Image (tube, rainbow, N blue to C red):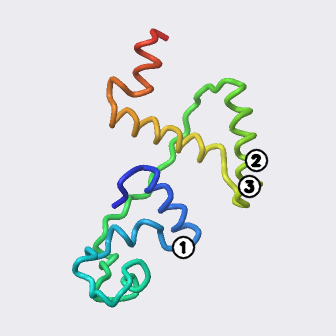
Amino acid sequence: MPESLWQAVQMEVDKQQGQAPAQAHSATREPAASAPSDVQPDVETDRRPDLQTDVSTLERPKERRVERRPYDFYTDQVLWLKEMKLEIEKRYGKRVHANEMVQLAVDLLIEDYEQNKERSKLVLKLVADGS
């Protein structure tokens, strides 16, 4: 189970690219103390069947449904999204969509509020500032 939203997003990206998630193995591996001393934990442990977790028992997130909503954005926000989309595509060679970026931003806003409540950026900016 990922420890943060960022790890969950990274694991999903890795899964879509057909790669083994970078942090999934370390979370499912037996503690190093129980591994034989002649085995290097980061290399050989992942290949040993007796030390692997049955992936069928791991909790998987349900598919998220998309719901269309009409929200207004500032022009500078839309321009920034377009620029970042192009920059990310050029730099990393992977196509991204502005919708994905906005969805991620909302997820990060949710995470910030759930962790910080009245000290979240949402409350500090929209409530405390009186906007």
Circle nearer the N terminus (2, 3): 2
- Position of residue 20 relative to residue 85, above or below, is below
Tell which tag, 3 or 1, sits nearer the viewer: 3
Circle nearer the N terminus (1, 2): 1
- Position of residue 44 relative to residue 31, above or below, is below
Question: What is the C-alpha distance between the residues marked 3 and 1?
Answer: 20 Å
- Residue 44: x, y in percent? 40, 86
Dot 1 surroundings within 10 Å: few (below 14), some, or many (20 or more)?
few
What's the amino acid at mark 3?
Arg
SS at circle 3: helix
Circle nearer the N terminus (3, 1): 1
Q: Nearer the viewer, residue 105 or 61?
A: 105
Q: Which residue is mark 2?
A: 86
Q: Which residue is mark 3?
A: 91
Which quadrant of the rendered structure holds the N terminus?
Answer: bottom left
**Could you say which disc has been placed on residue 10 in the image?**
none
What's the amino acid at mark 1?
Gln
The residue shown at (49%, 38%) is: 106
SS at circle 2: helix
The residue shown at (45%, 9%) is: 130
Question: What is the C-alpha distance between the residues marked 2 and 3?
Answer: 9 Å
SS at circle 1: loop
Asked which quadrant contains residue 37, the reply is bottom left
Dot 3 surroundings within 10 Å: few (below 14), some, or many (20 or more)?
few
Q: Nearer the viewer, residue 65 or 58?
A: 58
Asked which quadrant contains residue 77, the reply is top right
- Position of residue 43 relative to residue 70, above or below, is below
**Could you say which disc has been placed on residue 19 in the image?**
1
- Residue 9: x, y in percent? 49, 55
- Residue 80: x, y in percent? 71, 34
Question: What is the C-alpha distance between the residues marked 1 and 2?
Answer: 24 Å
